[in-house]
Image (cartoon, rainbow, N blue to C red):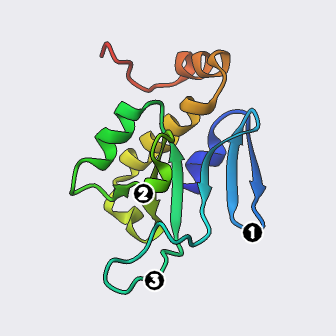
């Protein structure tokens, strides 16, 4: 995940107060790691999840597509209602293929990149278009 995020064009990596990476494009975060929060807890123990990654998405429709599939490791919490992002526990990242994770990171970047940067990257990438 770090390799893919850092490889996207015009990315800067900052670090939050907790020392965890925040990936940005044009000063807009597209992937970051949350501190443990009371809205994301283990249902059995009540312990806060220490390993939540936030990925921006392009739309509420895209968010719902990722979180409505019960087999998906992506989730959301009421704190993120109306926010264009999905959550993933780092401990569940292995449930995604490399291609799936790459697509989520690239989509996160696209959701925050300027239209000109997004067009330039799409024009130069081998990523299939919606028409394919």
Q: Residues within 10 Å of mark 3 (few under 14, many from 20)?
A: few
Say whether disc 1 or disc 3 marks the residue closer to the N-terminus. Answer: 1
Name the one closer to the observer, 43 or 34: 43
Alpha carbon separation for disc pair 3 and 2:
15 Å
Quadrant location of the C terminus?
top left
Which label sits in the foreground, 2 or 1? 2
Query: Looking at the image, which residue is at 45% across and 83% down?
Result: 47
Which residue lies under the disc numbered 3? 47
Query: Looking at the image, which residue is at 75% across and 62% down?
Result: 16
Say whether disc 2 or disc 1 marks the residue closer to the N-terminus. Answer: 1
Left/right of residue 70 with respect to residue 7 in the rendered view: left
Whether pointer 3 and pointer 2 mark residues with C-beta atoms closer than 8 Å, the reply is no
Which residue lies under the disc numbered 1? 19
Which label sits in the foreground, 1 or 3? 3
Give the farthest residue toward the left.
70
Which residue lies under the disc numbered 2? 77
State the image quarter where residue 110 is shown: top right
Left/right of residue 102 with respect to residue 118 in the rendered view: left
Question: Relative to 50, is 28 above or below?
Answer: above
Element under disc 2: loop
**How far from the left and from the top, in percent, is residue 14?**
78, 54
Q: Residues within 10 Å of mark 1 (few under 14, many from 20)?
A: few
Q: Residues within 10 Å of mark 2 (few under 14, many from 20)?
A: few
Name the one closer to the observer, 76 or 130: 76
């Amino acid at each position: 995940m770090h390799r893919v995020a850092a490889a996207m064009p015009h990315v800067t990596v900052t670090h939050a107060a907790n020392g965890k990476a925040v990936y940005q494009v044009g000063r807009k975060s597209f992937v970051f790691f949350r501190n443990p929060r009371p809205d994301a807890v283990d249902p059995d123990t009540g312990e806060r999840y220490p390993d939540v990654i936030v990925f921006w998405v392009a739309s509420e429709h895209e968010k719902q597509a990722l979180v409505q599939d019960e087999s998906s490791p992506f989730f959301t919490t009421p704190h993120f209602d109306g926010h264009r992002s999905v959550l993933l526990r780092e401990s569940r990242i292995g449930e995604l293929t490399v291609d799936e994770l790459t697509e989520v990171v690239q989509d996160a970047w696209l959701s925050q990149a300027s239209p000109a940067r997004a067009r330039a990257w799409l024009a130069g990438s081998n990523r299939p278009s919606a028409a394919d």
